[in-house]
Image: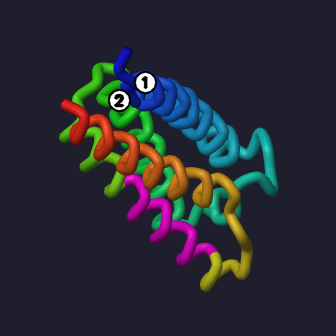
Amino acid sequence: MKNSNSGALKACGLIMLIFGIVYVLVGTMALAGIISNVLPGHEAQEVIIIVLAYAIALLGIVCGIVCMKGITGAAKVCGIIFAGIGLASLIYQQVVYDTFALVDSLAMCYGIAIFSIASKVEKEN
């Protein structure tokens, strides 16, 4: 029996889908003022933070769907873009607000994991 990493790619896709949906909900609640001190920059309605957050959330949903369908080429691209946007957001919040955003760190790690797993699946096929 041949081992395959396609199950791991689908699992990462499911995690990304849930991550994107939760990130949209939390970001919207922070913007509306329902919750506070969760996402730095949202309360002050810093435009770049909000744009990066929703870009990460939207890409997370798209990347989750692509991974669950098993499209490795698109999953690799989504993963590397996801990691780049997560890193940009992480660096910006560190420099401007002197804070560490766990959510953006997770986004960067998920992006790297998806890129790595999609590369392995692509080599297997």
Spatial separation of the CA atoms under disc 2 and disc 1: 6 Å
Disc 2 element: helix
Q: In the rendering, at what x and y percent does residue 5 appear? A: 40, 30
Residue identified by numbered label 2: 67
Range shown magenta: 82-93
Q: Quadrant of the C terminus?
A: top left
Residue drawn at 22 percent across, 38 percent down: 122
Q: In the rendering, at what x and y percent does residue 74 appear? A: 21, 39
Mark 2 Cα-neighbour bin, 10 Å: few <14, some 14–19, many ≥20: many
Disc 1 element: helix
Q: In the rendering, at what x and y percent does residue 110 appear? A: 51, 47
Residue kind at label 1, given as amino acid type: Lys
Q: State the residue in front, 13 or 113.
A: 113
- Quarter-wise, where is residue 67 in the image? top left
Residue drawn at 37 percent across, 42 percent down: 59
Callout 2–callout 1 Cβ contact below 8 Å: yes
Residue identified by numbered label 1: 10
